[in-house]
């Protein structure tokens, strides 16, 4: 706790932060492209060092009520008044332009509220690592522009790989219309949205994807500590049109942008929102469009909450702190992707839960991902009840370690693959027992059936299983590969166990590969060792695959006297060089 408190005030490397602060000198290089004024984490840490150095010594006062400030009380309004405006006034530059780092492309776009503690904000950013703070405070009209969709904010979001929402414990951030608009744009752009909050002395993060070296199970366990109970009331019931703005014209322009109305400066929309006259046909039409936007924002948070609702005692997805998450998701009629990638190993995920979540996939949804790997209460019944719309284009279905789903029922699953898919990620590996054997066993008949139902426009396919045929099951695998359509460009095959794999089979696999492949990876475990002469023949087949640019071959033989023999290649050139 002492270390945590020290880091909150000084950071893990205060001397480096001070060195950076001391390097801040006036220079002549402007960064005209606002979207490239991203601040590095080190620069934010430098700001913290400045606050610690100057707040008490220079008698900083609150921008709201004039009271004396402690460093931990300084918010962005205060920082702007006491530091940013005075330092940038003469040059009329952005605070970022005082640093010598020059133009920087944002890694993450940070959406936040100015009323939060700067220290909380920086600790949240340290936890996530991001870029932020780009506008010239003396010239906001130029930077923000008259069209929100063309603003510096929007351009920076387009450059970043995702958006980080820094939330406060009372979720006041959601009452700011710029934040709401940024979140709306994030959802509409189908960008990654992470949410971080500083609560109970430490940051807590909901991430779109697992953190580095973090399994889906670990992700779920970490996110259980997020203070959902405190913020759900705001995040799951946001009303974008009621958001506040420091400048009324910003709200007018955002509201007009949301309803696609011109001119953007017309204040009629604001008057209608404030009056709320349901007899006014224009207001009713506005409300219909705002409702669509609100539904998108709420559904994004609801999707992120589902796995936690299945992990916390006393909560469920149909009553999560008083909210029906499923209903919120269904209300987003424009939603094109639904992803539940962190349900791994949850005992609360049953056949009924699985099918309930799958039923959320309507005809408007193009991408659906659900990872129930290791959920021991998933059985054959889930396959029987499974139904997906034929219009689905991207599917990730992870049934790995399914101890209660047989090969016969997986054959039935193959018949239910949506015909419009362009990408399919399928894990049907059995459960690994203590003796190392995977059960139920998987056979080539599964691959034969899959070959009959491969979508005609499929471009990407990833398949994970075991292969337990006594004869090796090569015929089924070759039939499956040979049935791939001309549209296929990426193929990944992984057999957790292929006990009866023989070294020569790798040659037959490469002979069956379609010439359209640009990426191919294959992982084989517990079979025979791939000998040099077989690799030489593989190299000959690679010459035929003139579009192939990415290649991985990894095999690990069954242990002999406790020793494994491994083949591991990571490029086309590596295989060709070996065979020379």
Image (cartoon, helix red, strand yellow):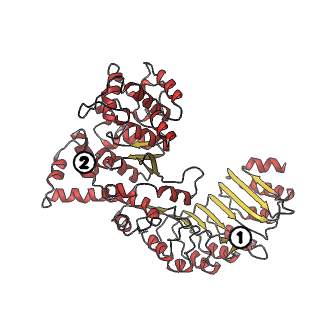
- Are discs 1 and 2 less than 8 Å apart at CB? no
Residue 139, compared with residue 306, is above or below; it is above
Which element type, helix, strand or loop, lies under badge 2? helix
Quick check: 1 left or right of 269?
Answer: right
Disc 1 versus disc 2: nearer the observer: 1
Rendering coords of residue 474 (x, y %): 75, 71
Mark 1 to mark 2: distance in Å? 62 Å
Res 486 visible? no
Judging by the rendered image, the residue that carries numbered circle 1 is 434
Rendered residue at 16%/51% (across/down): 274
- Sequence-first disc among 1 and 2: 2
Residue 168, compared with residue 556, is above or below; it is above
Rendered residue at 47%/76% (across/down): 352
Rendering coords of residue 516 (x, y %): 65, 58
Quick check: 342 left or right of 150?
Answer: right
Res 25 visible? yes
- Indicate the quadrant where residue 554 lies: bottom right
| Identity of the residue furthest to the front in this view | 2
- Indicate the quadrant where residue 201 lies: top left
- Number of other residues with Cα within 10 Å of mark 2, as a class: few under 14, some 14 to 19, many 20 or more: many
Quick check: 362 left or right of 474?
Answer: left
Rendered residue at 52%/58% (across/down): 221
Rendering coords of residue 487 (x, y %): 59, 61
Judging by the rendered image, the residue that carries numbered circle 2 is 256
Count how many numbered circles sit on residues in the image. Answer: 2
Closer to the camera, 217 or 550? 217
Residue 551, compared with residue 4, is above or below; it is below
Quick check: 487 left or right of 263?
Answer: right
- Number of other residues with Cα within 10 Å of mark 1, as a class: few under 14, some 14 to 19, many 20 or more: few
Which element type, helix, strand or loop, lies under badge 1? loop
Rendering coords of residue 426 (x, y %): 59, 66
């Amino acid at each position: 706790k002492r270390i945590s408190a020290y880091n909150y005030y000084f950071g893990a490397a205060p001397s480096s932060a001070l060195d950076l602060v001391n390097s801040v000198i006036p220079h002549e290089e402007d960064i005209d492209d606002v979207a490239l004024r991203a601040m590095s984490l080190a620069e934010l840490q430098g700001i913290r060092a400045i606050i610690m150095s100057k707040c008490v010594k220079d008698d900083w006062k609150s921008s709201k009520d004039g009271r004396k400030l402690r460093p931990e009380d300084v918010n962005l309004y205060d920082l702007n008044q006491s530091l940013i405006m005075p330092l940038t006034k003469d040059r009329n530059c952005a605070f970022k332009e005082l640093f010598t780092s020059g133009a920087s492309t944002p890694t993450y776009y940070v959406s936040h509220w100015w009323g939060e503690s700067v220290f909380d904000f920086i600790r949240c950013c340290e936890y996530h690592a991001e870029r932020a703070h780009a506008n010239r405070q003396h010239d906001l009209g130029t930077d923000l522009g008259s069209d929100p969709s063309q603003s510096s904010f929007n351009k920076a979001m387009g450059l970043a790989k995702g958006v980080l929402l820094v939330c406060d414990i009372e979720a006041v951030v959601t009452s700011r219309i710029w934040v709401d608009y940024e979140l709306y744009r994030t959802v509409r752009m189908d960008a990654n949205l992470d949410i971080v909050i500083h609560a109970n002395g430490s940051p807590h993060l909901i991430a779109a994807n697992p953190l580095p070296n973090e399994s889906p199970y670990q992700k779920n366990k970490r996110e259980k500590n997020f203070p959902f109970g405190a913020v759900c009331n705001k995040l799951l019931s946001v009303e974008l049109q009621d958001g506040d703005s420091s400048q009324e014209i910003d709200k007018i322009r955002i509201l007009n942008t949301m309803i696609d109305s011109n001119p953007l400066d017309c204040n009629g929309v604001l008057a209608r929102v404030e009056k709320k006259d349901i007899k006014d046909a224009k207001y009713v039409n506005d409300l219909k469009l705002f409702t669509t936007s609100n539904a998108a924002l709420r559904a994004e948070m609801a999707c992120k909450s589902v796995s936690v609702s299945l992990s916390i005692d006393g909560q469920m997805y149909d009553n999560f702190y008083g909210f029906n998450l499923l209903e919120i998701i269904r209300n987003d009629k424009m939603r094109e992707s639904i992803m539940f990638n962190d349900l791994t190993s949850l005992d609360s995920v049953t056949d009924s839960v699985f099918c309930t979540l799958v039923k959320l996939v309507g005809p408007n949804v193009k991408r659906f991902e659900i990872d129930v790997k290791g959920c021991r209460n998933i059985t054959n019944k889930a396959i029987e009840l499974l139904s997906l719309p034929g219009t689905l284009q991207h599917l990730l279905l992870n049934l790995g370690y399914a101890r209660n789903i047989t090969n016969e029922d997986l054959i039935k699953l193959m018949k239910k693959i949506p015909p419009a898919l362009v990408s399919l990620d399928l894990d049907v590996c059995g459960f690994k027992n203590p003796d190392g054997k995977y059960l139920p066993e998987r056979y080539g008949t599964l691959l034969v059936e899959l070959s009959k139902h491969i979508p005609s426009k499929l471009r990407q396919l990833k398949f994970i299983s075991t292969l337990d045929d006594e004869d090796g099951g090569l015929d089924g695998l070759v039939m499956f590969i040979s049935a791939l359509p001309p549209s296929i460009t990426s193929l990944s095959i992984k057999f957790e166990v292929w006990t009866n794999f023989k070294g020569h089979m790798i040659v037959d696999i490469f002979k069956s590969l379609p010439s359209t492949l640009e990426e191919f990876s294959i992982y084989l475990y517990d079979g025979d060792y791939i000998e040099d002469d077989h690799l030489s023949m593989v190299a000959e087949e690679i010459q035929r695959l003139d579009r192939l640019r990415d290649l991985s071959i990894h095999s690990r033989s069954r242990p002999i006297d406790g020793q494994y023999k491994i083949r591991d290649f990571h490029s086309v050139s590596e295989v060709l060089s070996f065979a020379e």
